[in-house]
Image (spheres, rainbow, N blue to C red):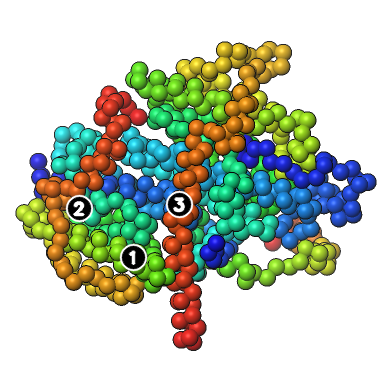
Amino acid sequence: MDTALFEFCLRMGDNTLVLGHRVSEWCGHAPVLEEDIALANTALDLIGQTQFWLGLAGEVEGKGRDADTLAFRRDAWDFRSVLLVEQPNGDFGQTMMRQFLFDAWQSLMLDRLKDSSDVRVKAIAEKASKEVAYHLDRSRDTVVGLGDGTAESHSRMQAALDKLYPYVGELFGADEIDAEIAERGIAPLPADLRGAYDALIADIMAEATLTIPDSRWTHTGGRDGTRHSEHLGHMLTEMQWLQRAYPDARW
Amino acid sequence: MYAQMVKSTGKGVKSREEMTEEERHFQDRVDADEKIEPKDWMPEGYRKTLIRQIAQHAHSEVVGQLPEGNWITRAPTLERKAILLAKVQDEAGHGLYLYCAAETLGISRDELTEKLLDGSMKYSSIFNYPTLNWADIGAVGWLVDGAAIMNQVPLQRTSYGPYSRAMIRICKEESFHQRQGYDIMMKMAKGTPEQKRMAQDAMNRFWYPALMMFGPSDKDSVHSAQSMAWKIKINTNDELRQKFVDQTVPQAEYLGLTIPDPDLKWNEETGHYDFSEPDWSEFYEVLKGNGPCNTERLEARRKAWDDGAWVRDGLMAHAEKRAARRTAAE
Amino acid sequence: MSKEWPLWEVFIRGQHGMSHRHVGSLHAPDAEMAIKNARDVYTRRNEGVSIWVVEAKHIAASSPSEKGPLYEPSESKVYRHPTFFDIPDDVGAM
């Protein structure tokens, strides 16, 4: 089995699975109808991307597991999502800050994956990058709008940034899998995206009148599955309950 | 229906002799199937009744997101999750279209929202029932949307232009909702014994609440007569309920599900099914706020509204600052 | 109650080459957000290739009471329609 490619697909697909789930939790509860509808669109895109990435992971693995089996029958330690996307929604500001910090990374990553040496990866990236360009547009505007809004919205957005920034570094982690995938021309080294990412974040946070924390220190453990957040287990308890309670059922 | 027990104002339908010239002209236009548009003259009662009816319909769409939204995070496959999310998102869209239609009558969406939250405006009784197993999502699509469509299809011809256009758009989008519900029910009814049990359980709990959606018999109601004369109500509640039962019974038979009504039977003479009336005292209790989920539903909407205030204000403040900066730069 | 987001009218071009058509309204704090909201609210089913938004208060509308003077005079100008003229079939397509 092509372990490196399998792991890479899980890293991409588990991020979108977990974040798509988080964003879908807003449905029916957003601050205004227009935002409710927009968030659902984002979640729908992420769920669609999950089907592609996990579908490809299953294909690469070659053991007959499809996207649903991978999504609903793995335990937390086999997930490869970054800790950032596992973080709970918090208030709307925290959700949009998390979204922006992820969108910025995902859009840079997908742009590079459009040149992937693997045609399947390239095809997913071509479709997904258009969706993510819009997500980024929207989350960026919202972060700027709320950062530069009222005193209350500003302080909530600063709190969200302070809380979430220590999870950003994990997106740029590097291990043997990253090295092999980069070596084979499937994806860039995550660390190579950091410069462009920092520049983008700096621009937007300046516009939003928000201050990026000085420390680059980062939590890790999600993308390699060594130490996920406690939140992930709770999410899976809810997400996988039906499939595990009735394993013989077809839905 | 989504708009239940909407009282029209006034004492009943006026005869032509009792009408002013403006009222006669207005009624002639309605009778000729002309659409009434926002700037046209309209009787005050027509305007007020429409605001109540459209707003109640809009509130129902938005509160109606909650019972189905309850299962988005527990959907059994990625595809089912996407379909359900898209469907619940459509309900938000429908609420939005309807609020906009109501706004053309001279009331703002925020005012209407406040009226929902302070209890002075209602939403459909059906959304105060819980969704307890996955088959409920099927039953809601099949029975609840099925009942709603019965009412919404004729409302596309309603006399008020913006309302009619909103209903046309809604009906177009709604067409997949009932089918996805039935699709879930087919999978469940033909699935494992546990899935069949879920399907029957959903049927048992949703049958009578679905019948209640049409509201109590209104064949003698003066309010309904006025609304029908104004073409903001097209059929009587009993007509629609009968049509719904006639359509649904064979669909339930196909699924092999039992409708929880021992007296349900085909009547050769009338060419319709005979069926038992729902418990109307339960219906009135639900409207009063005593349904199984009234408290949770309103709390959820209130929380979304209150927690969202800083977001709405923040984005508005930013837009104003930006506009001011642009003006200053010019 | 805080200040409500203004109301915007949304116009969408359904296909290349067609005119923008009014599809409905929505609320947004400014024009940029109104366009984004319109994209999310009114093009969920692949309905558009271009969006216009206009703040509702900026739309000037004709008055219903002037309907007669505004529109009826054109009813009598039947010669403006091609079917007014009889052209023999022998002439061919025109």
Front tag of 2 and 1: 1
**Residue receiving disc 2:** A82
Look at 25% across and 60% down and name the residue there: A164
Q: Quarter-wise, where is residue B214 in the image?
A: top right
* Subunit bearing disc 1: A
- Categorize mark 2 by other alpha carbons within 10 Å: few (<14), some (14-19), many (20+): many
Look at 59% across and 31% down and name the residue there: B285
The reply to whether residue B99 is visible in this rendering is no
Question: In 3D space, how far apart are the residues under numbered discs 1 and 3 (Cα atoms)?
Answer: 18 Å
Tell me: residue B46, above or below residue B84. Answer: below
Amino acid tagged 2 = Val
The residue nearer to you, when weighing A158 against A139, is: A158
**Residue receiving disc 3:** B304
Viewport quadrant of the N terminus of chain B: top right
Look at 53% across and 17% down and name the residue there: B260
On residue A157, the disc is: 1
Element class at badge 1 = helix
Tell me: residue B310, above or below residue B206. Answer: below
Q: Marks 3 and 2: same chain? A: no
Q: Marks 2 and 1: same chain? A: yes
